[in-house]
Image (cartoon, coloured by chain):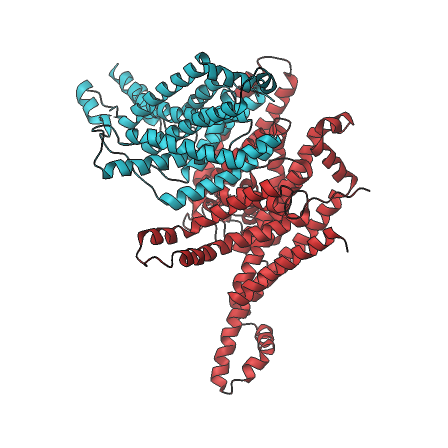
Amino acid sequence: MVDLLNALIVLLNYIFIPALSYGSQLALGALGVSFIYAILRFANFSHGDLMSFGAMMTILFTWLLQSYGISLGFLPTAILALPLAIIATILFSLITDRFVFRHYRTKKSTPVVLAMVSIGVMFVIQAIVRIIIGPDDRQFFDGQKFIMKAKQFKQITGLNEGLAIKSTQVITILVTIILVSLLFWFLQRTRTGKSMRAFSDNEDLALLSGINPDKVVFITWLIVGALATVAGTLYGLDKSFKPFTYLGLVLPIFASAIVGGIGSPIGAVVGGYVIAFSEIMVTYAYKKFFIYLLPKSLEPSGLVQLLSTDYKFAVSFSILVIVLLIRPSGIFKGRTL
Amino acid sequence: MNKTNRNEILAILIMVSLFLLVGFGQSWSLSLSILNMCIISAIMSMGINIQWGYAGIFNVGIMGFTALGGLAAVLVSYSPVGEAWRVGGIGMIISLFLLTLTIVAVFFINRIFRNHSYKYWIIGLTIIIGLILINLFFRPAVQAIENVNPAVTGFLGGLGLPIIFSWIVGGLFAAGVAFVIGKIALGLRSDYLAIATLGISEIIIAVLKHEDWLSRGVKNVIGLKRPVPYEIDLQKTDWFISLISYLNTSKLSRISDSIESEKLLNQLVIEGSSIFVKLSYMILFTIVLLFILYLSNKAQFSPWGRMMRAIRDNETSANAMGKNVVKRHLQVFVIGSAVVGIAGAMMITQNGLFTPSSFLPLRYTFLIWVMVIVGGSGNNLGSILGAFIVWFTWIEAAPVSQFLIELFTSGLEDNNNFKLHLIDSVPYFRYLIMGSVLLLILRYRPEGILPEKIRHS
């Protein structure tokens, strides 16, 4: 019985909690990509770097607040800096839209051209981020690191295995829940949200019924900027902020959005968790888990790892391919043009 | 002389003058190494131009195909590691056989159970059984191979053939992988193909980094054989020394002291040998470049090229005219990727070493896209011009932006924090330049510097 509990704690500690927080970050990122895809109708390759821009803004504001001696006690100061960073990122994305994307929208360019344009934007954001904050690793987490330390857990329960809960993980999950519920409330219950859904479903019909496209686009960038900042900051808090990692996030984010059904908000959230859980479950070495469960004679000699962690991408990509082959519109019926 | 021809001649003149500028301004050796990389990039961007310019296929996996070409260079030229083959060769061959068997089985199941709803379950089960069987032989073989003298080899090695063959093999590797991706992702939406290729290129890099038995992984393969002579041998060869002294007769005769002139000759020979090697690479690369340029131009203006244009410009009507759009797309995707693979093999040949961790999407995928768009999609000469201009800017952006920053901040003191910060971030100004160039071209001249020529015949 104790062994079983120990085994469960191993799973909880190394798979469930990390996957839940990583999945939340992916879900927020995928929501951003999905929104752009549904309203502006292109695959935005610069989204990963918009996230890094948002995270950079949070870091800058955190430093500013810290220099004034403001902090949140046991919570990270970054939470206080987040609203300011969101405003800055929204402004930045509105400027990009005004000077870059709008032109192609009015010209009714094909989605591929817009995707190409987003690559140009990606280059520019990468340059801005690296010039302002540099390419190095930045730790900007302050406050209390753990809510529950592995040692404490062992003392309380008397089990062999510890369960460590980092405060960043709890913050990530809580913020995601709040943000996603707000978003769904907005989309389902408010007039503007409904007009956005209408615009995404059928642009011409929406225009005919008097929906102002400029307003819809404006609101989209507000939401996307906020989502990108929060996702980027949470990822940076959880791991650490390194500008180049955000380009690598583009692939799992797109995979999440497509697996869930691109253009469908609920799909993006589910897709994020599907990708995160499968990435971590497939690349985790289950040796410890089996040692607790199996009798001594059957103990595994290897790591019992399906794939090495280097193949994280391969996992999200394989899921993507499977979904594309079997159900191109994703789990929740997304847009198939 | 009509206007388009004038533009082309102007383009070639610009390219030549850029290199003369670096040659006289900085050094000929640098100029030639930039030129060689330009030629390789030009071949890559021609490959992408075949996909994008001819058929409108958006491929974001250039990095992967380049790396496959590089792998070909290693596998063709490195001498086989006999010990590794002895200990793990049989296991590897059995695993390869089982892998083929699994794939064939999946293929047939897919065909036989076409209309059954449980098809995917059977396929999944077959794959899992296949993987377990393969692992039975594969894991021990890998273990054995990687334990063979890990500091020097620890992999199977290659065939030990001249490296120049790898240019063809690299093309074939890339074509094979492109065929598989194309089968899956072409026919879906265009942005899905982009994401699929982005994913596959990351996976190819992950495999090369991780499968030590194949490519030595992050331990890198160094000392690949060259198709051209080594500098150190040249410096001892009589005909080369006499060539150098003949070329510099006037310079040498001006010095009367024999020891001094000996010294100068020695120095000239060392410089000359490096330039000679780069020149020989340049000649080889130029031959490939001209060959591919000739073929692609020929293809573009053939009935096949016209059909591609028709498909690109209006897929529906081309389909209605009886053209098999998916099949043509697959064909052009494979051809373009093969060209990129050739360029990848050439690049590794020139570098003489294979380092999987140096493959970054920004440098090997997105930069090539900037080249294609800047040069002019649909125009082969334009792609070459774009590659030359963009690669040249990429290399020379750092010194130029350093100079500009120092110029603009000359009013500030040397220890001013802002100035120091800007000087630290000089390497990143090239991203800014590339992004802005791409955005400006897309906005104000979407057809590129040299627009596509449509010949009505």
Check the image and report above or below for B211 versus A220.
below
* Residue A64 placement (x, y as % from top left): 28, 38
The residue closer to the viewer here, A38 or B96, is A38
Q: Residue at x 49, y 43 (%)?
A: B362
Q: Is residue A84 above or below residue B268?
A: above
- Which residue is most to the bottom? B256
Viewer-nearest residue: B112 or A46:
A46
Q: Quadrant of the C terminus of chain A?
A: top right
Chain with cyan colouring: A
Task: Provide residue A334's location: percent of width, then percent of height.
Answer: 54, 19
Q: Position of residue B290 (x, y in %)?
A: 69, 53
The residue depicted at 50 percent of the width and 85 percent of the height is B258
Image quadrant in which the N terminus of chain A is located: top left
Asked whether A318 or A39 is in front, the reply is A39
Query: Is any atom of residue A91 visible in this view?
Result: yes
Front residue (pair B360, A310): B360
* The color chain B is rendered in: red
